Image (cartoon, helix red, strand yellow):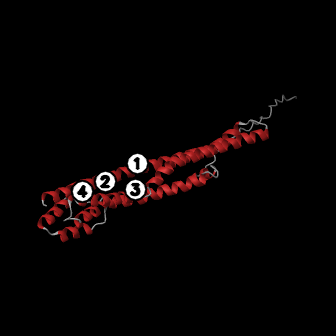
Amino acid sequence: MTFLQITTPAATSLPDVPQQVQESMSLLDLLFKGGWVMIPILFLSLVTIYIIIERTLFLSRASEFKHGFMDGIKNSIVKGDLSSALSAVSQHDTPVYAMLKRGINRIGSPLKEIESSMESAGRVEILKLEKNMSYLGIVAAIAPMLGFVGTISGVIKIFYNISLADNISIGLIAGGLYEKMITSAAGLIVGIIAHTGYQLLNMKIEGITYQMEKSGLEFVDIITDHK
């Protein structure tokens, strides 16, 4: 008896499908891929953060001014109690109080001399407020340029490697290019932070300057009305 043998072809193995492995990359690893240009950009970022924090704290203290303080100064001056007025302003170390202190010390002098003395004190205090602010402007201008230099340097290296390999590979171009564009992104981010901090801090300084001018005018009016 003959058995009909049906042979089934062996199951053909499917070709191996390459799986794309997505490598997780930390922020630190990503920054390191930017090359040597990331070193000055990182330094500028630290400088920016330090100045913004330091100036923010300083300007917050410098903007302190008690509401109704000028009324108390007016009452003391009207009563002729200059020592009380001087003691009141000496308890605070802010630009407005420093300017008023200079004015109180000059009471009895000609009005123009008092105004000139207070203006000089005000300019000195404004210079203190603007300390290190110019560095933020410099960082805002330089950081993006450094990032662009890093990208251009990377592109030059990519084309140099292509000339050596005599092969135009998408992986060779894209891989090297994305690494070097990291510097442009980092430079722009640092520049944006520096520029934003510069503008916000300047707004704070303008507010303090306005308070100084307002208080100075009120003080001159007090001196004029009760001379």
Three-letter code, disc 3: Glu
Tag 4: residue type? Answer: Gly
Write the residue at 27% across / 63% down.
97
**Which quarter shows the N terminus?**
top right
Element under label 3? loop
Label 3, label 2: how far apart the Cα atoms are: 11 Å
Q: Which residue is mark 4?
A: 216
> Taking 122 as reference, is 83 left or right?
left
Question: Disc 2 or 4, which lies upstream in sequence?
Answer: 2
Circle 1 SS class: helix
- Inspect the image, locate mark 2, and give the three-letter code of the amino acid beneath it: Thr
The picture places residue 165, in percent across and down from the top left corner, at 78, 40
Three-letter residue code for mark 1: Gln
User: How far apart in space, not on screen, are marks 1 and 2 (Cα)?
Assistant: 15 Å
For mark 1, does the 10 Å Cα neighbourhood hold few (<14), some (14 to 19), or many (20 or more) residues? some
Q: Which label sits in the foreground, 4 or 1?
A: 4
Along the line of sight, the residue nearer the viewer: 194 or 175: 194
Query: On the image, which quarter does residue 124 sit in?
Result: bottom left
Q: Tell me the mark number nearer the camera, choosing from 1 and 2.
A: 2
| Nearest to the observer: residue 105 or residue 60 | 105
Q: Where residue 160 sits: x, y (%)?
A: 74, 41
Which mark, residue 130?
3
| CA gap, disc 3 and disc 4 | 20 Å
Dot in front, 2 or 4: 4
The numbered dot on residue 209 is 2
Query: Residue 179, percent across and down?
Result: 64, 45
> Where residue 177 appears, x then y in whole percent?
65, 41
148 relative to 120 in the view: left or right: right
Q: Which residue is mark 1?
A: 199
